[in-house]
């Protein structure tokens, strides 16, 4: 099938490449000429495991092309809208500038019988609002939210755990048949597929992220209680996680959630709920946000306390800048935030990360970056682990103790074994762990 994907960021580039890998003919459209140049060369413009391979194969096959010209989307049967919906500069709501611009720019190129499929995360009501702009051209519109996680984006796109189609015509509509054809391999594999109206599809996405954020903040709230009582939040998570109704996943207490999705999605959801007169219903999301942001300061406070009240001039190695491992994304990253706060307090901060240094440097050029992990650790008076990359989890406490000036560790992700690190002479400080 001939498809276009408007917007080639973390979502769109993966979607375009994944759709080409299952046999579709795909054109990816983006306003960023440099991004289009790299994608056209079969090279991912960001770090995502497995993406380079399917991009290169798609470009090589001739089925995957990229362009800055919206006119190249003309003639596709399905047009996916995968542009970003960041937080507004002047408030908590979603900035729909890119979605609106994409649909407006696409409209003149649409033809009768074509289907515009929104994948961007949007406030409830957006699809209905865009509907007349699309239908005026003879095309139709559907909303098909995306649940991919960075770091697992290719697998999540090719083998999603569910498909949600927000359509106007119900289960037997032509739009559903079209989407089934797009996702034929996943449908054939028995992937659960839910056909809904627009509002439900839009809400499925934001409520899923709101739930995940709440789960993380719940366990981080328990970490705060654990810190006041001497309990161990990791053991607590293990114990409650055995209850299948609760489940152990997304119960890792630490420096909290970040990234381009969870933080801005809960804020946009709360803002939208206010607009529709239901602010009260999701007021708890404000607490979820507050708990989350408190954990960043907690990591900083723990370190400052361990230096007796001041980190001025203290050499601190910050391990991790990405908002999570296997990603180079530093948008709203708790790791980068901790580094910035420590730097602001006068610490001599040296930051390292396997993939995210370039993005971090663009946001915060004032920090000192070191690509080599050993050099970052050399002479450190404290080590702060804030992104649980595999290479950090695998560090040998004995070897690292030999490299640093003082064996003091704040494990902002509770991902190391306190027993092993203490046995190697370290002062180990976890979050919500005695
Ligand atoms: C999230 C959702 O998980 C995806 O389903 C969704 O499609 C995506 O947002 C999106 O809206 O596009 P992602 O932002 O890639 O995916 O990252 P997550 O794996 O959800 O992690 C988010 C943050 O929570 C990270 O900073 C991570 O370190 C943190 N986290 C996660 C915890 O602090 N504790 C946990 O137990 C789990």
Image (cartoon, helix red, strand yellow):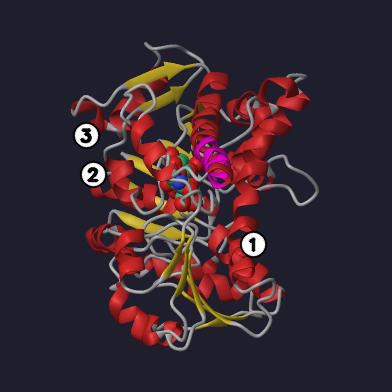
Where is mark 1, residue-wise?
Answer: 301
Q: Position of residue 377 (x, y in %)?
A: 43, 82
Q: Which residues are magenta?
A: 218-227
Q: Position of residue 45 (x, y in %)?
A: 43, 66
Where is mark 2, residue-wise?
Answer: 22
Where is mark 3, residue-wise?
Answer: 185
Report helix, strand or loop for mark 2: loop
The answer to whether the residue labelled 2 contacts the one labelled 3, judged by CB atoms less than 8 Å apart, is yes
For the N terminus, the image quarter is top left
- For image coordinates 74% across by 24% down, the residue present is 279
Residue 199, quarter of picture: top right
Q: Is residue 42 visible?
A: no
Report helix, strand or loop for mark 3: helix
Between 160 and 409, the residue placed more toward the observer is: 409
Which of the marked residues, 3 or 1, is nearer the chain's N terminus? 3
Q: Report the predominant secondary structure element of the magenta stretch.
A: helix
């Amino acid at each position: 099938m001939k498809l276009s994907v408007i917007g080639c960021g973390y979502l769109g580039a993966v979607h375009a490449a994944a759709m080409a890998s299952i046999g579709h003919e795909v054109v990816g459209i983006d306003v960023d000429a440099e991004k289009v140049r790299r994608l056209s060369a079969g090279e991912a413009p960001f770090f995502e495991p497995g993406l380079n391979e399917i991009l290169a194969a798609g470009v090589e096959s001739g089925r995957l092309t990229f362009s800055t010209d919206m006119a190249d989307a003309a003639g596709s049967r399905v047009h996916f809208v995968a542009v970003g919906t960041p937080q507004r500069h002047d408030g908590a709501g979603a900035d729909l500038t890119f979605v609106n611009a994409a649909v407006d720019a696409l409209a003149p190129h649409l033809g009768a019988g074509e289907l515009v499929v929104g994948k961007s995360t949007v406030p409830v009501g957006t699809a209905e609002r865009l509907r007349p702009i699309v239908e005026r051209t003879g095309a139709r519109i559907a909303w098909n939210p995306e649940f991919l996680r960075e770091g697992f984006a290719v697998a999540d796109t090719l083998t999603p755990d569910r498909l949600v189609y927000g359509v106007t015509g119900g289960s037997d509509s032509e739009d559903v048949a079209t989407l089934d054809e797009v996702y034929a391999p996943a449908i054939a594999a028995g992937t659960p597929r839910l056909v809904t109206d627009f509002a439900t599809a839009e809400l499925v996405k934001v409520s899923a992220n709101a739930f995940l954020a709440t789960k993380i903040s719940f366990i981080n709230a328990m970490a705060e209680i654990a810190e006041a009582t001497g309990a161990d939040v990791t053991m607590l998570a293990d114990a409650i996680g055995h209850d299948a109704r609760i489940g152990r996943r997304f119960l890792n207490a630490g420096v909290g959630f970040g990234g381009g999705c969870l933080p801005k999605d809960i804020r946009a959801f709360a803002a939208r709920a206010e607009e529709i007169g239901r602010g009260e219903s999701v007021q708890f999301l404000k607490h979820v946000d507050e708990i989350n942001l408190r954990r960043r300061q907690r990591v900083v406070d723990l370190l400052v306390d361990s230096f007796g009240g001041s980190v001025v001039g203290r050499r601190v190695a910050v391990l991790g800048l990405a908002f999570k491992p296997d990603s180079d994304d530093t948008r709203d990253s708790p790791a980068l935030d901790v580094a910035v706060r420590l730097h602001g307090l006068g610490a001599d901060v040296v930051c390292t990360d396997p993939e995210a240094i370039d993005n971090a440097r663009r946001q915060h050029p004032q920090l000192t970056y070191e690509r080599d992990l050993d050099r970052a650790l050399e002479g450190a008076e404290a080590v702060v682990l804030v992104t649980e990359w595999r290479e950090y989890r695998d560090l040998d406490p004995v070897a690292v103790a030999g490299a640093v000036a003082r064996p003091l560790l704040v494990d902002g992700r509770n991902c190391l074994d306190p027993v092993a690190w203490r046995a190697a002479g370290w002062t180990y400080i976890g979050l919500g762990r005695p």
